[in-house]
């Protein structure tokens, strides 16, 4: 039969039930042999969490990732609820922080590209800068939960182009402008071309900014007695994302000449480029957490996420260094169930976003791939919307429940994106929706007390 997994609403979200490949909620799980192999490579030991009610399970089990030594509830909810700064860069920071405090948020996710990261080149500089940031938070009864590094990560992972040059600023942009003013033009067949020397500057600055962010996260964590994650993107080296559709097929050889598989090359390059960042994470006790997403090496599905973790584990980087920032909005429109993702990779989820996505039932003019129309176009088959709104295809409550089942104890950041709603009103509406369904988890079965 067909079932609709928790957290996946709307037509087409059903998954075929099969006793060999689904759990008791009808959510598809990888075959046992594959799951065990992932466990060996990622964690070094085989571990399957017993579900509540099974032998060896209890609601007090120390499982899942904990951002704090003891759980910290929010002002109005079980989890602390923050707001992602990135989409609010047009509002002065102090005004925005006052808005958070006045409307019941518990904290926020920093946008690293807005920060004075050169202050974090030294230990003393990073510690002093962290103190100034935490003081801003404490004055308003807030905390800093994470530091977003999506833009710099995309720059470091992708092959250099003008598309990612716009994310980095500074010396790379100056070098590009100098190159253009010298009379150079990008080739007609590659309008986003940047010369090699500009590309090198881009990746060097991106790597430097990522390490600065990791160092800052370490000191923010010490000052707040919590782990502060560094969520972001890792790009798609060797243009791997452009091969998501398997036509033309990827050749293995031509005329007897072997051709490397771009999927493997992409992962190898990712490890090489991010190794200094991952090493900094190990030094400082911080995790860099990929937000699986179209355009990334892990594209927002369970399969490519496993490829990513296995490749990094093989290179010596386990979930003490890398992991995931789960965002269900990137999965649902692709037909991927975020509940199944949490069940597969719960131990690797170090931070979480709540963002809404509307998935239109039936045909649309631009379809799910967008027909080269902008995000937010009414012609698209899906669009980001205010989390918890009636348009939202993500079941926010079921996602939070599943995070609780996985043992996740930490903040949840609302990432507001909605081209049809005013941003402050949308953020408040999303916060109310999350508060309404973020209940404390049960401490036992509801019928335990039905005894004479």
Image: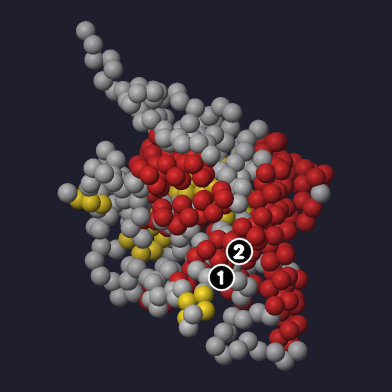
In depth, the one of 209 and 441 nearer the eye is 209
Residue at the front extreme of this rendering: 256
For the question of whether residue 84 can be seen, the reply is: no
Position of 157 with respect to 45 (left or right) is right
Q: Is residue 37 left or right of residue 450?
A: right
Kindly identify the residue that appears in the image at 55 percent across and 61 percent down: 267
Relative to 319, does residue 196 appear above or below in the rendering?
Answer: below
Give the percent coordinates (x, y) of residue 424: 50, 54
Q: Residue drawn at (58%, 44%), measured in percent from left and top? A: 318
How far apart in space, not on screen, are marks 1 and 2 (Cα)?
8 Å
Q: Badge 1: how crowded within 10 Å, few (<14), some, or many (20+)?
A: many
- Residue position marked by numbered label 2 in the rendering: 269
Q: Position of residue 280 (x, y in %)?
A: 70, 48
Going 77% across and 47% down the picture, which residue do you hit? Answer: 126
Callouts 1 and 2 close, C-beta under 8 Å: yes
Q: Position of residue 426 (x, y in %)?
A: 45, 54
Q: Secondary structure at mark 2?
A: helix
**Quarter residue 56 falls in:** top left
Q: Could you tell whether 76 is left or right of 122 in the image?
A: left
Q: Which one is in front, 318 or 81? A: 318
Tell me residue 230's x, y (percent): 61, 49
* Vertical relation: 412 (above or below) 71: below
The residue that disc 1 covers is 238
**Quadrant of residue 304 within the rendered picture:** bottom left
Q: Is residue 229 left or right of residue 249?
A: right
State whether residue 361 appears in this view: yes
Q: Quadrant of the C terminus?
A: top left
User: For the residue carrying disc 2, how many other residues have a C-alpha within 10 Å: few (<14), some (14-19), or many (20+)?
Assistant: some
């Amino acid at each position: 039969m067909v079932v609709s997994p928790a957290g996946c609403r709307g037509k087409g979200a059903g998954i075929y039930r099969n006793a060999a490949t689904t759990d008791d909620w009808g959510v598809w799980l990888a075959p046992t042999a594959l799951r065990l192999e992932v466990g060996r490579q990622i964690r070094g030991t085989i571990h399957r969490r017993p579900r509540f009610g099974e032998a060896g399970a209890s609601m007090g089990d120390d499982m899942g990732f904990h951002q704090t030594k003891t759980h910290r509830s929010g002002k109005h909810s079980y989890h602390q609820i923050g707001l992602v700064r990135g989409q609010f860069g047009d509002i002065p920071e102090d005004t925005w922080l006052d808005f958070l405090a006045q409307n019941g948020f518990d904290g926020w996710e920093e946008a690293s590209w807005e920060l004075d990261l050169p202050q974090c080149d030294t230990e003393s500089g990073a510690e002093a800068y962290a103190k100034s940031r935490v003081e801003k938070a404490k004055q308003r009864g807030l905390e800093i939960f994470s530091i977003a590094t999506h833009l710099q990560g995309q720059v470091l992972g992708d092959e250099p182009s003008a598309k990612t040059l716009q994310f980095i600023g500074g010396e790379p942009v100056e070098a590009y402008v100098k190159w253009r003013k010298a009379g150079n033009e990008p080739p007609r067949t590659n309008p986003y071309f940047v010369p090699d020397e500009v590309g090198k500057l881009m990746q060097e600055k991106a790597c430097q900014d990522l390490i600065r962010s990791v160092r800052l996260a370490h000191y923010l964590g010490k000052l707040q007695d919590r782990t502060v994650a560094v969520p972001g993107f890792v790009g798609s080296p060797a243009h791997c994302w452009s091969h998501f559709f398997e036509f033309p097929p990827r050749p293995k050889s031509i005329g007897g000449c072997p051709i490397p598989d771009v999927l493997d090359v992409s992962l190898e390059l990712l490890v090489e480029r991010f190794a200094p960042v991952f090493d900094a994470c190990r030094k400082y006790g911080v995790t860099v957490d990929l937000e699986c997403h179209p355009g990334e090496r892990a594209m927002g599905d369970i399969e490519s996420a496993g490829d990513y973790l296995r490749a990094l584990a093989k290179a010596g980087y386990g979930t003490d260094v890398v992991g995931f920032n789960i965002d269900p909005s990137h999965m649902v429109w692709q037909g991927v169930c975020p509940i199944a993702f949490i069940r597969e990779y719960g131990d690797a989820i170090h931070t979480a976003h709540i963002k809404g996505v509307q998935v239109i039932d039936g045909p649309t003019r631009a379809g799910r791939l967008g027909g080269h129309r902008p995000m937010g176009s009414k012609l698209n088959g899906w669009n980001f919307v205010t989390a918890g709104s009636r348009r939202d295809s993500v079941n926010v409550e079921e996602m939070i429940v599943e995070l609780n089942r996985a043992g996740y104890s930490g903040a949840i950041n609302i990432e507001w994106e909605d081209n049809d709603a005013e941003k402050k009103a949308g953020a408040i509406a999303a916060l109310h929706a999350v508060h309404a369904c973020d209940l404390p988890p049960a401490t036992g079965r509801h019928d335990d007390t039905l005894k004479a």
